[in-house]
Image (spheres, rainbow, N blue to C red):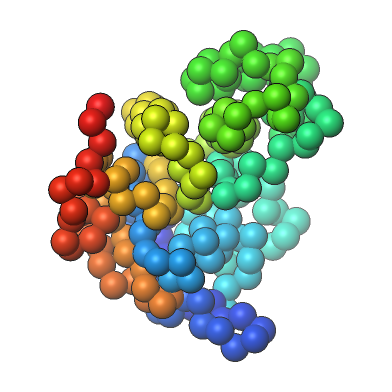
Amino acid sequence: MIKVQNLHKKYGNGRQALKDVSFEIKQGEFVYCVGPSGSGKSTLLKALSKEIQTTSGLIQMNQYRVDLIPSRHLYLLRRQIGIVSQEDLLIPQVNVYQNISIALKAIGTPKKEIRDKIERVLSLVQMGSFEKSLPEELSIGQRKKISIARSLVNQPSILLVDEPTANLDGNASVDMMKLFLKIHQTGTTILLATHDSTMVNSIRYRVLELNDGQLIRDDAKGGYSRYTDPKDIYIW
């Protein structure tokens, strides 16, 4: 569950990135966050994971008040949410298996559980045969799948995703969308920020639209915009 109430974020340079944003997302929902560059999408996701501190307003993720949680307890929140950033942030010197295991070792997962968890998520993203590959040996789409696997390894109830199809071609974008549909079917709540109008128009879920830091639309089964272009539909 995600609850955001009267959220504001003002940066040190005076730019108001979020302006009085309020919404609620129920457990198990799939929600798109759309809007032009600079509209506040990435800022919102960073605020939800407390990567940045907000100026004012309430953020609740499951039982945690994100705006109030002290840094020493932040790991409790991070166990419940998965984060897929625009940048893959894989460690180039170590293989796929080691990249994912680092997240498990950081929270003290017993060794006997690590392999089972990694095999499960690599199977989910259809990358089970790549565990010994280095990041440089993978395509952009494959690296993104590994980043998603890493975000899912602790079985989070909420997944925050920022521009997952950026730099992907049409076929890879379709594969990526199918993957998120599969993840959603497990009961995971997904909030996905995207510029990909074709993705949003092909698979209709709730849409939150930001513009200049303000929430200007909350549409239960909307398209990328109020004026959907029929060509922006995938042929599955």
Res. 203 image quadrant: top left
Residue 90 visible in the current orientation? yes
Q: Residue furthest right?
A: 93
Q: Position of residue 156 (x, y in %)?
A: 53, 37
Res. 91 image quadrant: top right
Residue displayed at 47% across by 75% down: 18
Left or right: residue 12 versus residue 225 is right
Residue displayed at 44% across by 31% down: 172
- Above/below status of 93 relative to 16: above
Q: Position of residue 40 (x, y in %)?
A: 47, 69
Left or right: residue 211 versus residue 136 is left
Left or right: residue 112 versus residue 143 is right
Q: Quadrant of the C terminus?
A: top left
Left or right: residue 61 versus residue 127 is left
> Which of these two is toward me, 233 or 189?
233
Residue displayed at 46% across by 43% down: 165
Q: How many marks?
A: 0
Res. 127 image quadrant: top right
Residue 180 visible in the current orientation? no
Q: Position of residue 202 (x, y in %)?
A: 24, 40
- Above/below status of 43 relative to 136: below
Residue displayed at 51% across by 76% down: 17
Q: Position of residue 10 (x, y in %)?
A: 56, 81
> Which of these two is toward me, 53 or 127?
127
